[in-house]
Image (cartoon, helix red, strand yellow):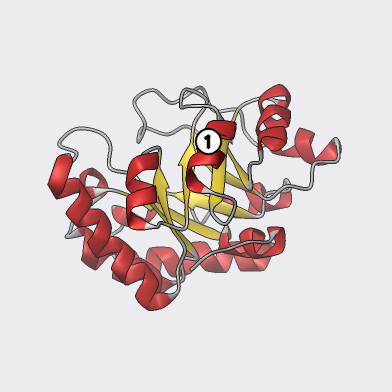
Amino acid sequence: MTILNRNAVREALKVYFIMGSPNCMDQPTHVLREAIEGGITLFQFREKGTAALTGDKKIELAKELQKICREYQIPFIINDDIELAIALHADGVHIGQEDEPIEEVRKKIGFDKIIGVSVHSFDEAISALKGGADYFGIGPVFPTTTKADAKPSNGTKLIEELRARGLGIPIVGIGGITAENAGSVMRAGADGVSVITAISHAESVIEAAKNLSNSVIESI
């Protein structure tokens, strides 16, 4: 599945699930299937952290998760690993400010793939936009413990600023988001919310995804 236009990207960002094996309480393939059943609209494979898989094991898991996404027509994005994304013909990649320049990433993956960029300021947003970003990931909106190197949370301030300054690019909020606070992120101007443990660590993955989806839909 390939997304080529901004409106399609905007729709796909609504309930954006990020996961790798270190984030799961159950088998990653089982967690992903349940999250899809609950209503996620996009999946990002992020294999980082303590006990993260590497080499052939990482590739094998990526293939299994991608197969599930294709089965359900869910876009499959890979975090940072450009070479893996190219090898698997993933639907796109998500990169941070410490990764290689977006212009170089675009040259490598082509113009028919999605590139998401994490931005933390107006200047970073403009740079990413000029480089060809398809969407911004903004956060952490709320405090989070999932990323050891996470920046301090800044609420919805940057989302509001970008919208106030006329940027219409799709935006997804990330960091400490739950079904209870997702509505405030959407009302600030985001097109969707992105979560990891709010779904992957939930007692019921299906219910957690449903609740998050309902919160997003109700705030639109």
Is residue 112 found left or right of 79 in the rendered image?
right
Counting from the top left corner in percent of width and height, residue 27 is at 17, 60
Label total for image: 1
Quadrant for residue 154, please give it: top right
Quadrant for residue 129, please give it: top right
Is residue 147 found left or right of 23 in the rendered image?
right
Counting from the top left corner in percent of width and height, residue 197 is at 35, 48
Asked which secondary structure carries label 1, the reply is: loop
Q: Residue at x 42, y 34 (%)?
A: 144
Reply above or below: 1 against 184: below
Counting from the top left corner in percent of width and height, residue 102 is at 57, 33
| Residue 157 in view, yes or no | no
Q: Residue at x 78, y 47 (%)?
A: 168
Q: Residue at x 50, y 50 (%)?
A: 194
Reply above or below: 124 against 192: above
Q: In the image, what residue type sits under mark 1?
A: Phe
Counting from the top left corner in percent of width and height, residue 72 is at 40, 76
| Residue 46 in view, yes or no | yes
Circle 1 is placed at which residue position? 142
Q: Callout 1: few (<14), some (14-19), or many (20+) C-alpha neighbours within 10 Å?
A: some
Query: Which residue is more in the foreground, 39 or 43?
Result: 43
The C terminus appears in which quarter of the rendering?
Answer: bottom right
Query: Which residue is more in the foreground, 120 or 66?
Result: 66
Q: Residue at x 31, y 70 (%)?
A: 68
Is residue 187 found left or right of 75 in the rendered image?
right
